[in-house]
Amino acid sequence: MGSSFGRGGATQPLQDMANADCIVIQGSNMAECHPVGFQWVMEAKKRGARIIHVDPRFTRTSAVAHRHISIRGGTDVVLLGALIRYVIENDKWFHDYVVNYTNAAMIINDHFEDTEDLDGLFSGYDPETGKYDNESWGYERSHNAEEGAPSWHVECDDTLQHPRSVFQILRRHYQRYTTEMVETVCGISSEDFHYLAESICANSNRERTTCFAYALGWTQHTLGAQFIRTCAILQLLLGNVGRPGSGIMALRGHASIQGSTDIPTLFHLLPGYLPMPAVTEQNWEEYLDKISSADQKGFWQRRDAYAVSLMKAYWGENATAENNWGLDFMPRLSGAHSTYHTLQAMMRDEVDGYLVFGQNPAVAQSHGRLQRLGLSHLKWMVVRDFQEMETATFWKDSPEVKTGELKTEDIQTEVFLMPAATHVEKCGTFTQTQRMVQWRFQALHPPGDATSELQFFYELGRRIKEKIQDSDDPRDLPLKYLTWDYPVDEHGDPDADAVLKEINGYHLSGEKAGELLSNFGEMKADGSTSGGCWIYAGVYAGGVNHAAKKTPGQEQNELAMDWGWVWPANRRLLYNRASADPDGKPWSERKKYIWWDEDAGRWVGDDVPDFPPTLAPGHQPDPGAVGPAALSGNDAFIMQPDGKGWLFAPTGMVDGPLPTHYEPHESPVPNLLYHQQQSPTRLIFKSVDNLSAPNAGEPGSEVYPYLFNTYRLTEMYTSGAMTRTLPYLAELQPELFCEVSPELADQLGLEHGGWATIISPRSAIEARVLITDRIEMLTVNGKDFHQIGLPYHYGQSDAVGEVRGDSPNDLLGITLDPNVNIQASKVSACAVVAGRRPRGAERTALVKEYQRRAGLTPDTGNVRVTASEKAEAESASVVGRHNAQSVTPRGSQATPSTESHHVEGGPAGQRPQDPTKKEE
C-alpha cells in the first residue's frame, strides 16, 4: 500500500468499516482471526452493507457473509486484475477522482515495455541476477520544463488518451484478465465473478463506498506485496481511498504487529520507516538520497529533518554535522539479514549466538526441520518467554532427535531460557491494526526473575556499556556515545513513560528547549530537535500522554479522537483530502468527511486533515518549489513524490510496476496467462535441504499433485506454545487435523476421524482427517483441483502440554517475496496418503523416496525465467536500457534491489512485513 498511497498502514479505523456499503474480505478469515474488529463488519451488515468473503475455505467469516466465493490459493492477481478490467471496460471507474488524484494521466517514457510485450517480463529484467533495473519505468520529463526544474515536472495527458499514459498502459495490461480466465485459473464461476464485480461497482461512486480487508492470506506469497498492490489499483479506480467506508484494512494479527514495524524489529529499517544505512552510503547526503529525492513533492522531501532528529535521539550531543549526525557510528548493511538469510548463515556456521523473544521458530517458521538444524549449529541461544517451548527444547525432543538425524550429545548449542513478563505485568504502548498507539497499564509486577523486554534490553545495554567504558577501541565508540539515561523504578524497570517521550521528541535548543514536540512538522535538520520515531511525534504533545486517553465511546463521536492516538498527527482516516472533490466540496452529503471552508480559509471536519490545513483547492505551486510547498490543491497523497495515488508504480516495487500473475513457487497448474511460470524476482535458496517440487508439466510434478493452505484457529494462538498448555483451549482443538473435500477423501480412501500422511519435498507429517464441504473441489484448467487445509499451531515438544501434533510448517520450503522478504507459506505442493506416517528413521526414508520419484535436485522448480525464447531475447535487449528524458519518482527510498530490502508500505512509501511474523 505504501507504493500505491505513500504510507503502508491501514487507510482507516476499524470502526469506519461500519460506514461501508460493501465489504470484501479476501486473504483473511476476519471473524475468527480478528473477532473484535469484526464487530464493525457486522455493524455494516446491519446498516445494509453487502459482505463478500473470498477464500479457499468456507469459514465463520463466510457463514455471516452474503456470499462465499472459493478461490484457488495464490491466484488473487487474476481475480483482482479481472475486476480492474471489468471496471475500465464497463466505464465504472470514478472519472473525476482518477484524473485528479491518481497518476493515470502521467506519460511513461517510451523505453518501457510491458509483460504484454515480453510475455510475462517487464523491461529492465536481468536474468543473471533475477532483478529489475527500473529506469525504463519512469515518467517522461515535461517538454516545457526549464533546465534544473524539480523532478515532479512530467508529461501528462488529462484526456487519458495518450497510448503511453498510465491509464492506457493499465487498460492494455489487464486485457487478458478476462472472466473466462478467472474461471479457468481461479476456479471461480462466471456467476460468482459477476456477483462480486457488480456488487463492488454498484457500491463505489459519489454516494457509496466499498472497503477491502486482508491479512496473511495475501501477504505470505511470492506475490504477496503485488496482491495488495492490485487491490490498491482497483480501489483508486473506484474512488475508494480517503473516504468514509472505503480503503484497505490491513489486518494485523497481534496487539503490536504494526508497532513492531513502525519502531521496527526489521533488519533493514530504522524507526519511522527510515532505511538502515548500507555499506555503500559513506556520508550524510548519500544516506539521504536513499530515502527520497531532494527535489520531489510531498513530506518525504523533509527526510533530513526526520533523520537528523533520530540521530540526535540515538547519540545526543555526540551527533554533529562533522560526524554525519552520528551516521559514522551506525552499523551498515552488507547484504540481506532477514530471519531466513540468517538461517542460511547458521547452516554455514557463520552465526555464534541467537536471541529469540516473542517467537518460536522451531514451529512457527517455514521449513521447521531446517530451522531446528540451524539452531543446532549455534554456540549459544537465549530464549525469553513465559514458558518452555519447542525452540528452547529442540536439543532433546525435536523430530530430528527422534529420527536420529540429530543426537542430543552432539549438539553444542548452549540454551539459556530466561523468564519474561506477560502483557499484564508491564506497562508501555502497543500499536494495533489501525495505527493506533494505546497505553497499556501494568496490573501487577512480574514474579521471580521475569522481566519486561524494556528492562531486559536496558539492563543488557547498561552492562555492555559498563564493560567498554574505559575502551579506546574505535569500534566501541557507538556504544559509549549511545544515550542510555532512563530513570528506573525500585524494581530496576526503566520508566516507559520516559521512553515514549524520547520517541515523541524534544526541542533541544532555542526558546522551546526542553519542551516536547507537538508534531513532526516541528522537526529540524539542524540538530535542534530530537525524535525517536518521527511518525509518532505528537503522541506526547503538550506533556500529555495521548496514547493513554481512554474517553468512553458514549462521550464522543464515532471517530473517537480521544481514545488512544493514531499516527500520523492523530489522523484517523488517511488521504482524507480525497473525501472532497477538486473544488473542496464533499462528493456527496452522505459521504461528507473533510471539506474546504472558504470563510475560514482551511480544511475542516471532525478528523485531522491529511493535507496542509490552509492549502486551498486549485492552488498551483511555484514551478521551482519542492517538498510540501510543491503540493497542489489536488495532490491528495501528500507522501508520494508526485502527490498522486499510483495506479502504475515507477518505483517502490522490485517485481514490477503493475501486478502480474505468476503461479506460486510450487504449483501443479501452468501459468495460463504467460509463458513465465513463477515470479522471476522471487528470492530462492537452492539447497539439498530446501528442495522444491517440479513445475507443472515437468517430469515428477505428478508426485506432489495437491496444494495445502496453512491457516490459524481462534482457539489456538500462533505456534500454540501459549494455548496448547491451557486445558480449556486444548480440549477445543486437541490435535492437528487436515480439512479435505468429500471428493478427495473418496479418491484417496481417507476416513473421517482417521489419519492422513501429508508429504512435501521437505518433510512428512500426519494429521487427523476432517472431511468437510468447507473445502470445495474446484475446476481449474478443465480438471478437478483439490486443496487441503492445515492449521499450523502444533508442535512436538514434551514441554508444551499434553496437546501435541506434527507441525505443518515442517512441510514448507523457503522462498520469499522479493519486496518484503516474507515467506511463501500459504500455498505449497504435497502428496496425501491414508494412514499414519512412519516413525523414526523410516519417516526420513519416506520423504527421500518421494524426492527420488520426483527426481528432485536443488535446481528443480528454481528456474527464474521460463518465458519463450523470443521473450528472453527481447528481455536481454532491454537490460540496462536508460532514457535521459525519463523521470523515476522516488518515494521513501531509491528503487531497491533485494539487498536494500525495500518493503511494500510504510509512510516512507513502504509498509513492511516482518518475515518473522508468521504468528500474525
Image: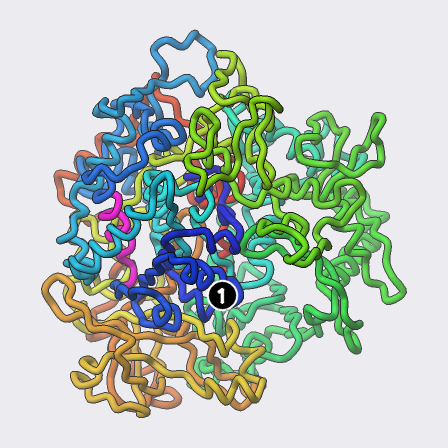
Q: Position of residue 814 (x, y in %)?
A: 39, 62
- Local SS, label 1: loop
Residue 899 visible in the snapshot: no
Q: Farthest residue to the front: give it.
A: 589
Q: Is residue 236 left or right of residue 122?
A: right
Residue farthest toward the right in the current orientation of the protein: 490
Q: Residue at x 70, y 73 (%)?
A: 418
Most frequent secondary structure within the magenta stretch: helix
Which quadrant holds residue 379?
bottom right
The percent position of residue 251, horizontal first and vertical second, equals: 48, 58
The amino acid sitting under disc 1 is His
Instruction: Count up the numbered dots.
Output: 1
**Magenta stretch?**
73-84
Residue at position x 26%, y 33% in the image? 123
* Magenta residue check for 76: yes
Residue 690 appears in the rendering: yes
Instruction: Judge from the rendering whether residue 760 lies leftward or rightward of residue 894; answer left or right.
Output: left
Q: Which residue is mark 1?
A: 34
